[in-house]
Image (cartoon, helix red, strand yellow):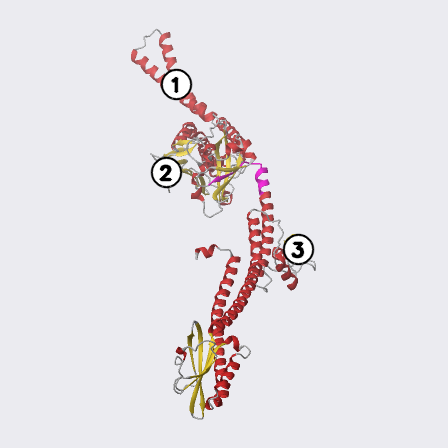
């Protein structure tokens, strides 16, 4: 079966037809041979019986009269008559005592023939194969009767060799006829198999051409297919609107349903409605060829559309203003990159191809795309990564926003990554934050001056004491000298700490995140604002949880956030005092805690509160709830909101008029 399976369809059809015909022919030949030979032999035997009966009828009188001469003449004439000369070997007549009365033998009569073929009692005749000398002979014995009595027996010998020659001649003729029939069937089978498989052979060649990407070949399915088209109507060329690429059925589907607002475009008369495989007549080969024609046309159509789409998206990919990468989803290796990626990162296309994208990401050991699969809620989904640090070929860092979408690249699962350089925007944000810090320092100048005056006054009092003692000529005891020196040193350290805190706060914020404890920027801010809050009779309540899990952020930038929140809380308390004039607890509460696996910080006040209608806009730039006298510009909370979001955090607000406001910040933890 395996060998038969490997044979071509043409040979299968051909050999199947030949095999069936040969089997049938052999069976018919054997049956016909048996029938013909049996019939011929029987017919010759009947002829021998007829000859013997004729001689018995005519020679009866000669036997009864003992006329041997006439009897001999009779049997010689009968044996030599016409075709009997070749068929009849001998004729003899014997009486009931097996005495030969007459015979046609030229030589002596063979005695073995006298009793070799006796007629059985009651039988009309007897036929037996005998050998007259060396010649095989069918001996036909017929009784010669007179009334009810048998008077003699007529024996006619039929030449078996002559009969065999007749049979051989008949066999040769029959075999020649069978052979001629087989030759004709062979040629017809060859033609039929070739005719049946010719369209299939051409379809195979066309399929090979399609496999090689060639769709411009002529659909030549042979004369049979052309006759098929001419007989049933050639409706294959069905171009839509004189476009040989678009068939009517595609236009029918592409135009969509008719609607009053967008009526269907009317097709010209020559473009009739047609469907795929609309011919449901003819043999299966013709229907297959017809379907193949439409398949090829459909492949051409969709290939053209695919080529147009690929060219369009490739041009968009190459002409994109931002870097675009195609990454292998499992390894993050770069599979493709557009020219903008080369110029943005400083690598050539050959250097980028096959490079791991991890080399372009942050050098702190973390890979932003490492958790891409965790964020996929469905195939084809996209994940946004804001303010990620990347590095150019020369090692210079810059900031980007990344949009990563799930896709396929050939047979591989991939990520298409669109990158936007936001370094300039980040720098402007940093400048805005820095300007806010300078404004904050100006706002804090009165409190800072008061805070610095305390250690300076203590230092001046100590130095004045020592100077007065020396002017009065008094000796300063060692104990007093140590006390004054120690107090001056403490006050100098205190002033230095205040100045160092101011210096750190005034520095431009570092945009690179680090692991830190959220309590640290809070404490640094309180060092600067606590004296000012005390001067304004505002109590500060701290509930800082320790040990607090670390987060990844910039401590300098978070100081700006907490300073804005504390300043807003202070202004809200003062606003309530100005509006009501009724004494109340002037308290700002700062709490740190963990919640749902995140680190949280809340800043609450007992101030005037914010109306519910304004809470939705509170983080919008240039929106302020402060009175004009307080000079609010509406940028503090907008900047704070952006800083918190940069580090994957959330900021929320709850407020109640006349009761106060609570801002809650939460950040993801890092190990």
**Residue stretch rendered in magenta on the structure:** 313-328
Q: Look at discs 1 and 3 and give the one toward the viewer.
A: 3
| Label 2: element kind | strand
Q: Decide: is 99 above or below 466.
A: below
The residue to which callout 2 is attached is 593
Q: CA distance from mark 1 to mark 2?
A: 35 Å
Q: Position of residue 567 (x, y in %)?
A: 46, 33
Q: Are marks 1 and 2 in contact (CB under 8 Å)?
A: no
Sequence order check: which comes first, mark 2 or mark 3?
A: 3
Q: CA distance from mark 2 to mark 3?
A: 73 Å
Q: Nearer the viewer, residue 304 or 198?
A: 198
Q: Position of residue 106 (x, y in %)?
A: 48, 76
Q: Which mark is residue 492?
A: 1
| Label 1: element kind | helix
Q: Nearer the viewer, residue 229 or 592?
A: 229
Q: Which mark is residue 516?
A: none
Q: Residues within 10 Å of mark 3 (few under 14, many from 20)?
A: some
- Residue at the outermost bottom position: 147
The residue to which callout 3 is attached is 239
Q: Is residue 410 magenta?
A: no
Sequence order check: which comes first, mark 1 or mark 2?
A: 1
Q: Is residue 399 something one can see in this rendering? A: no
Residue 606, located in which quarter of the rendered image? Answer: top left
Q: Is residue 321 magenta?
A: yes
């Amino acid at each position: 079966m395996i060998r038969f399976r490997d044979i071509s369809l043409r040979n299968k059809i051909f050999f199947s037809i030949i095999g069936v015909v040969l089997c049938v022919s052999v069976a018919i030949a054997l049956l016909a041979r048996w029938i013909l030979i049996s019939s011929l032999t029987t017919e010759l035997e009947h002829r021998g019986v007829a000859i013997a009966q004729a001689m018995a009828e005519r020679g009866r009188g000669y036997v009864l009269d003992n006329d041997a001469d006439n009897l001999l003449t009779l049997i010689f004439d009968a044996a030599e008559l016409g075709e009997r000369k070749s068929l009849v070997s001998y004729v003899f007549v014997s009486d009931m005592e097996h005495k030969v009365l007459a015979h046609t033998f030229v030589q002596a009569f063979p005695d073995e023939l006298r009793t070799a073929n006796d007629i059985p009692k009651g039988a009309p005749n007897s036929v037996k194969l005998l050998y007259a000398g060396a010649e095989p002979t069918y001996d036909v014995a017929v009784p010669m009767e007179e009334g009810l009595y048998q008077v003699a027996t007529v024996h006619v010998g039929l030449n078996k060799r002559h009969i065999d020659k007749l049979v051989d001649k008949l066999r040769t003729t029959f075999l020649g006829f069978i052979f001629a029939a087989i030759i004709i069937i062979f040629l017809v089978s060859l033609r039929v198999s070739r005719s049946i498989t010719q369209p299939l052979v051409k379809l195979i060649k066309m399929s090979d051409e399609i496999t090689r990407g060639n769709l411009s070949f002529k659909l030549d399915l042979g004369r049979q297919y052309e006759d098929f088209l001419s007989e049933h109507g050639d409706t294959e060329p069905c171009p839509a609107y004189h476009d040989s690429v678009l068939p009517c059925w595609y236009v029918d589907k592409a135009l969509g349903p008719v609607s009053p607002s967008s009526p269907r475009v009317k097709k010209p008369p020559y473009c009739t409605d047609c469907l795929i495989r609309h011919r449901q007549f003819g043999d299966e080969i013709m229907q297959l060829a017809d379907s193949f024609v439409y398949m090829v046309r459909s492949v051409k159509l969709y290939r053209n559309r695919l080529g147009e789409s690929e060219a369009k998206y490739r041009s968009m990919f190459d002409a994109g203003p931002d870097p675009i990468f195609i990454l292998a989803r499992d390894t993050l290796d770069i599979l493709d990159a557009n020219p903008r990626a080369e110029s943005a990162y400083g690598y050539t296309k050959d250097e980028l191809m096959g490079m791991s994208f991890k080399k372009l990401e942050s050098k702190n050991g973390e890979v932003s795309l490492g958790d891409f699969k965790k964020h996929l809620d469905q195939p084809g989904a996209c994940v946004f990564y804001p303010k990620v640090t990347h590095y150019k070929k020369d090692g210079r860092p810059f900031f980007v926003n990344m949009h990563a979408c799930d896709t396929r690249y050939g047979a591989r699962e991939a990520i298409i990554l669109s990158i936007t350089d936001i370094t300039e925007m980040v720098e402007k944000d940093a400048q805005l934050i820095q300007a806010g810090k300078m404004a904050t320092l100006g706002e804090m100048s009165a409190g800072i001056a008061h805070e610095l005056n305390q250690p300076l006054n203590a230092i001046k009092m100590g130095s004045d004491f020592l100077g007065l003692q020396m002017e009065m000529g008094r000796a300063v005891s060692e104990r007093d000298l140590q006390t004054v020196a120690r107090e001056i040193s403490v006050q100098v350290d205190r002033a230095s700490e205040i100045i160092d805190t101011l210096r750190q706060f005034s520095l431009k914020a570092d945009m690179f995140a680090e692991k830190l404890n959220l309590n640290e920027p809070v404490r640094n801010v309180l060092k600067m604002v606590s004296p000012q809050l005390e001067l304004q009779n505002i109590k500060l309540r701290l509930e800082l949880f320790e040990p607090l899990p670390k987060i990844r952020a910039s401590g300098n930038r978070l100081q700006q956030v907490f300073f804005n929140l504390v300043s807003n809380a202070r202004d809200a308390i003062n606003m309530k005092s100005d509006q009501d004039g009724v004494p109340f607890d002037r308290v700002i509460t700062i709490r740190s805690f963990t919640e749902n696996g995140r680190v949280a910080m809340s800043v609450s006040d007992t101030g005037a509160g914010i109306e519910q209608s304004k809470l939705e806009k509170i983080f919008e730039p240039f929106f302020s709830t402060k009175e004009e006298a307080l000079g609010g510009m509406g940028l503090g909370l907008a900047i704070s909101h952006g800083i918190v979001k940069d580090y994957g955090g959330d900021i929320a607000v709850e407020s109640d008029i006349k009761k106060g406001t609570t801002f809650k910040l939460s950040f993801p933890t890092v190990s």
